[in-house]
Amino acid sequence: MLVTPDELEDVRSGRGHRLSMVASVNGVEISSGNWSDLHWSFGDMIAYASRGTRVAPGDLIGSGTVATGCLLEHIGVDPTSDRWLSPGDVVTLEIERLGRIRSTVRAARPVPEIPAPATV
């Protein structure tokens, strides 16, 4: 779901909005946070991304993870989450009032082998 800024004006706070964010893997919450904890506003991120290039309407800009939303932050710290994503895992990201996206991890296609160069 996409919204215009005026639709979130009632929850504006600092650089973001007072909206909860949750990341889960296979239905188990691994991270939660609040959009108001952003270090950079989306305006700041768009300005930075557009340095030396043109950002056009319809371009998508990813803003990164919620604090502790990166699996690398969990590995070695939480003994119950010491694994990477595997084929079949379902990753769900949700932001209050904005919606939810869910993706299933698929196995990578086999990488073709490149023959070693001939020795001279």
Image: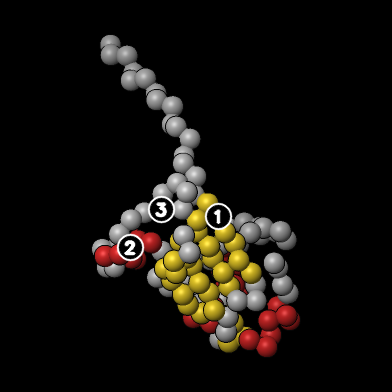
Kindly identify the residue that appears in the image at 65 percent across and 72 percent down.
98
How busy is the neighbourhood of tag 3: few (under 14 within 10 Å), some, or many (20 plus)?
Answer: few
Locate residue 35 relative to residue 55 in the image: left or right. Answer: left
- Circles 1 and 2 in contact, beta carbons < 8 Å: no
Q: Position of residue 33 (x, y in %)?
A: 47, 77
Circle 3 sits on which residue? Answer: 85
The amino acid type found where label 1 is placed reads Ser
Q: Position of residue 38 (x, y in %)?
A: 50, 77
The amino acid type found where label 2 is placed reads Ser
Kindly identify the residue that appears in the image at 45 percent across and 61 percent down.
25
Circle 2 sits on which residue? Answer: 81
Q: Earlier in the sequence, mark 1 or mark 2?
A: 2
For numbered disc 2, what is the local secondary structure? helix
Asked whether 66 or 40 is in front, the reply is 66
Residue 82 found in image quarter: bottom left
User: How far separated are the C-alphas under marks 1 and 2?
Assistant: 19 Å
